[in-house]
Image (cartoon, rainbow, N blue to C red):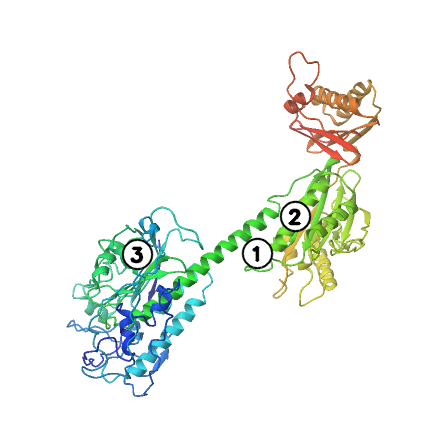
Amino acid sequence: MPRVTEYPTSQEGPQPAAAAATPAQGGPGLPAGAGAAADGRGRGASGGGCADELGHGKAPAPAAEGVRDTGASGAGPVRAHADGGIGPDVPRQRRTRDGAAARNASAAAAPALPDTAPGGAAGPAPEAAPAAPQPPPPGPDDACDPLPDANADAAAEGGADPAAAEGASPARREGDRLRFVGAATRRIARGIDLDEIVLGLCRATVPTFSDAILVYLRDPLPVGDERPVGPVVLRLRRTDRLRPIDDLTGAEGAGAAGGAGELDFSQLPLLGPQGDLPAAELCEIMPGGALAEVLRGVRPVFGSSAGAQDALPELLGAGHPLPRGRRAILAPLRGRRRVIGAAVFLRSPERPAFEQNDLLVAAQLATHTALGIDKAVLYGREAYIADELQRTMLPDSLPQPTGVRLASRYLPAAETARVGGDWYDAIPLPGSRVALVVGDVMGHSMTSAAIMGQLRTTAQTLAQLDLPPAEVLHHLDEQAQRLGSDRMATCLYAVYDPVSHRITIANAGHPPPVLLHLGGRAEVLRVPPGAPIGVGGVDFEAVELDAPAGATLLLYTDGLVESRLRDVWTGIDQLRERLATTAQLTGLDHPPPLEALCDDVLDMLGPGDRDDDIALLAARFDGIAPSDVAYWFLDPEETAPGRARRFARRALARWGLEELEDSVELLVSEVVTNAVRYAERPVTLRLLRTDVLRCEVGDDSPQLPRQRRARETDEGGRGLFLVNRMARRWGATRLSSGKVVWFELAIPAGHERR
């Protein structure tokens, strides 16, 4: 449902009645040709933004150009209203018990249009504006789209203007109108998204220009040059209104409501019985209908005009009470390409009706709003594309390899720049190892994100080849040079082995990682810095360090530790102290939770520290105990499968997993038989007991096995079929020295490690 904003009113004493005056045609205080622009005989201040978008007609001209401020005004001082509009300070009135007309408090803030006495002129009469060109005939798209791109003009209905306050200076009142338009358009332009722009229009016009407003927008809104398909539907996006003056408490309010104490809405036809704005939420525009013709004309029209009398019921709904006379303005909202909605301005009987020049004001407001909505929709689409690009470039979820737990965070540089070149990754490797990667491409733009995606894909491919960390960085450097001479990035690549409790790290110009030990000591690892990726011709060096069980390794990008307020080494020292403090709070016997640790690390960022993207990857080393590992070398002989079965039975008996003997013996025999068939060097067999039982068989043949369906007459070809049916998971990974085939079996429930 659309959101509704109410503005409170207050009661003041009665005001002197306004003297009636008969205005001249075209609106006082404007050049003679300005009035013709509003009724279809020329183009004035309202004509440029709506109908001249594609080059038809002339550029808009200021409505009061050449009008001098005489300074003799009887309308009182001019005040800047809280909603951004500017208008004369008109006292507010209330309704008396005898039913006399009174003015609403907030509604009187709208500046009245200047009038001229019969036979007189308010200012100099320049030459009449040239006649507007005729609208082009409907194109082939007009038949399927009732709101075409055609730049047609609409003839607004003319007529006599209502009476104005006695003694008001036309020049002064016209200046107030121009100041209001300037303040209102500035408020609308401040919005950056769709809701802010629509809210700016509502707050700028209610109560300064109108007592109520209804804003309808296309559903869905077209983006850029997209051509909508299907019927055109308008959805009520927002409504704002004044609170009825009868909706008061106390003796005066009860008296005004009547002796029965019920509210009397007879003088407020634009409000429903509950004080709301009864309007249809959805409206489908029928081709060739009255509403389609009014919106096709682009220019605002009075609600009392011939076309609007049929268009308003179609837009608002058949049951909506329509105000009489010039108390409604229907203004199409036209963007850069097409009409994208409509705005309805309404005034209650307690204030003067709309004048001819109010059409110019409505046109300016509608034009600025529509163009702002167009830009907001385009910005929203770009932000969506950026979010999707960044989301697909980063891993959706981290793997859970054996012996290590992982957590990650990513923060963009700003909400308006949601893409960047920072990335992180965790890649499972053969032998229950895992590769930990974090990198940072220079900049935080779409180009940086695209380069980051290419480098991340390259790193994943190289990791699957089981290359050493230094070799991975060397190939990444070559890939960055192929992408361009200015493609620079930093990267840190580490491989953790949970069996040996060791980690191998190679660095390419990246900040060093921090290792948080189980006792609470935080250590900045001494890793050779290396040159950034993309420099070329530089060797990378890898170091192998201890990774004790219970320790936490923190990989990060420079956005976490470097900003305009601190250098990188100061930030690293602060990070180390923060990790040590967090570990002491959770106790020295057990490490802090990973997710809470990541959040606590990001909390160290203060105001002004977010100058760059931030990628964070935390790894908790649990490791695999030596008692849970069984490792053997088998010569590539015919007796190797039998020896493998005996070794497997011994390990299962030691671990108390005799229930798995039959399955493990069968699967180990099949996998080792395939390895011995192609191997020339000793075959490796390793069993790992963690939350699952994992078996790994390695040989020096690079050819990966593939599952195939054996025929009834074939003597072989059923080994991998059995592995696929009986194992929980299985796979094969090519190594630089051969391959590894592995499978996993679930450990029976209730089993406890010995």
Task: Tell me the kind of residue under disc 1.
Answer: Arg
Residue in the image at 72% along x and 41% along y: 463
Residue 498 shows in the view? yes
Of 19 and 633, the residue lying toward us: 19
Q: In which quarter of the image is residue 218?
A: bottom left
Which x, y percent locates residue 466? 75, 39
Residue 82 shows in the view? no
Q: Circle 3 — which element?
A: loop
Choose the circle earlier in sequence order: 2 or 1.
1
Which x, y percent locates residue 471? 78, 45
Image vertical order of residue 589 relative to residue 204, above or below: above
Q: In which quarter of the image is residue 181?
A: bottom left
Which label sits in the foreground, 2 or 1?
A: 2
User: Is residue 687 found left or right of 233 in the rendered image?
Assistant: right
Which label sits in the foreground, 3 or 1?
A: 3
Which label sits in the foreground, 2 or 3?
A: 3
The residue identified by callout 1 is: 418
User: Is residue 249 found left or right of 747 in the rendered image?
Assistant: left
Task: Tell me the kind of residue under disc 2.
Answer: Gln
Choose the circle earlier in sequence order: 2 or 3.
3
Of 702 and 240, the residue lying toward us: 702
Task: Tell me the kind of residue under disc 3.
Answer: Pro
Label pair 2/3, CB-CB below 8 angstroms: no
The residue identified by callout 2 is: 454
